[in-house]
Image: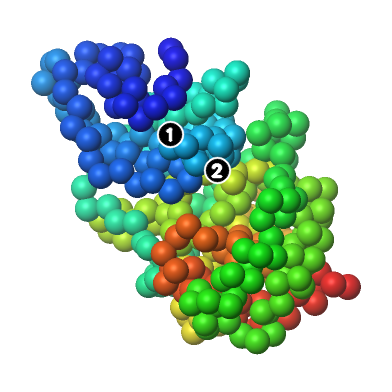
């Protein structure tokens, strides 16, 4: 099958028929979400009368096409790892990369009626975070130093690359405008943040033990089923890394500052219990504390360079992550 280069081709009955292995007679297009990637819902009618709701994800716009390489790890995740990743993901119907052009397209089944996608401005509950941390623990335990993944190029750490084309100008733009309004004064130094992140990136690239981490485990990268149970989407930043890279970042973005302060220790303990239940040795208390500080810096940097998202959402997540850094003196951890 040819990997489509345009959304029109990806939504065509002919191409979707080849994806589904059944004749598609009608495609009804839903509202398209265009950011870097394009996310397009479609309602598909088959010749036998069945209907399916699907999501098509690709890099179809002019600006998105220049970034299509960013989607390649997610394609590999769904094609090679998702079935054994130890967590719940949308059912994948097609995931492919054109090796000559890096065009890549992902087709997943809609996760069903009653599902919601948090916009990040309103935090979730500690009970929900316990559930999503259990998902992360399942992923981490299932991929812990797994043979065959150590040399997979699509899982190589890419954190250093995040500082090559992005950095101080983007951070300053956020810190000095509406998204930075709620930041503690102690975390507002853009040069200090990027210096700390470069140290962290070098550490993560050489980390051992490692597992597969989501890499961008914030509140906007989850979906909630009708019971409120969270699961993860958007796997563009999936890579090898230490377990902690996901955990502190996730807790800090999912909860209000008050709930994070009150429940962080108990939630981390629950995550570690799940990790141990998966056969992994429990990290020492010192390793846990040090790792969480690093994880806060990871998330804070990623949101400090984020521009093409609702400013109110950026502001909410920067405030939660920046306060966590301030509470734990996280910069100092990477300046020793």
Q: Is residue 288 left or right of residue 253?
A: right
Rendered-image quadrant of the C terminus:
bottom right
Residue in the picture at 43% in, 34% down: 60
Image location (x, y in percent) of residue 134: 50, 56
- 26 up-or-down from 288: above or below: above
- 198 up-or-down from 77: above or below: below
Image location (x, y in percent) of residue 172: 64, 71
Residue of label 1:
60
Location of residue 283 by image quarter: bottom right
Residue of label 2:
236
**SS for dot 2:** loop
Please tell me which residue lies in front, 175 or 187.
175
Outermost residue, bottom side? 185
Location of residue 66 by image quarter: top right
Q: Is residue 222 left or right of residue 240?
A: left
Q: Is residue 130 left or right of residue 188?
A: left
**SS for dot 1:** loop
């Amino acid at each position: 099958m040819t990997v489509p280069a345009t959304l029109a081709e990806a939504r065509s009955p002919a191409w979707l028929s080849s994806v589904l292995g059944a004749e598609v007679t009608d495609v009804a297009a839903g509202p398209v979400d265009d950011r870097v990637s394009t996310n397009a819902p479609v309602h598909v009618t088959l010749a036998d009368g069945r209907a399916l709701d699907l999501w098509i994800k690709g890099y179809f716009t002019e600006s998105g096409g220049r970034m299509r390489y960013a989607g390649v790890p997610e394609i590999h995740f769904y094609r090679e790892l998702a079935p054994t990743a130890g967590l719940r993901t949308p059912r994948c119907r097609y995931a492919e990369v054109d090796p000559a052009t890096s065009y890549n397209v992902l087709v997943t089944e809609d996760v069903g009626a009653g599902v919601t996608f948090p916009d990040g401005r309103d935090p979730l509950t500690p009970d929900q975070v316990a559930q999503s941390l259990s998902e992360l623990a399942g992923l981490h335990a299932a991929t812990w130093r797994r043979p065959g993944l150590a040399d997979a190029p699509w899982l190589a750490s890419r954190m250093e690359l995040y500082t090559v084309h992005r950095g101080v100008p983007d951070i300053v733009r956020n810190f000095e405008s509406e998204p930075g309004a709620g930041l503690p004064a102690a975390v507002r130094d853009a040069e200090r943040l990027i210096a700390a992140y470069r140290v962290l990136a070098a550490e993560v690239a050489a980390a051992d033990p490692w597992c597969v981490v989501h890499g961008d485990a914030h509140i906007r990268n989850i979906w909630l089923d009708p019971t409120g149970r969270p699961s993860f989407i958007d796997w563009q930043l999936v890579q090898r890394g230490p377990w902690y890279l996901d955990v502190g970042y996730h807790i800090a973005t999912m909860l209000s500052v008050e709930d994070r302060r009150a429940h962080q220790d108990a939630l981390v303990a629950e995550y570690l219990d799940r990790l141990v239940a998966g056969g992994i040795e429990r990290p020492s208390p010192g390793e846990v504390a040090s790792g969480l500080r690093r994880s806060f810096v990871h998330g804070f940097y990623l949101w400090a360079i984020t521009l093409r998202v609702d400013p109110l959402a950026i502001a909410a997540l920067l405030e939660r992550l920046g306060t966590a850094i301030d509470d734990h003196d996280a910069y100092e951890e990477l300046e020793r």
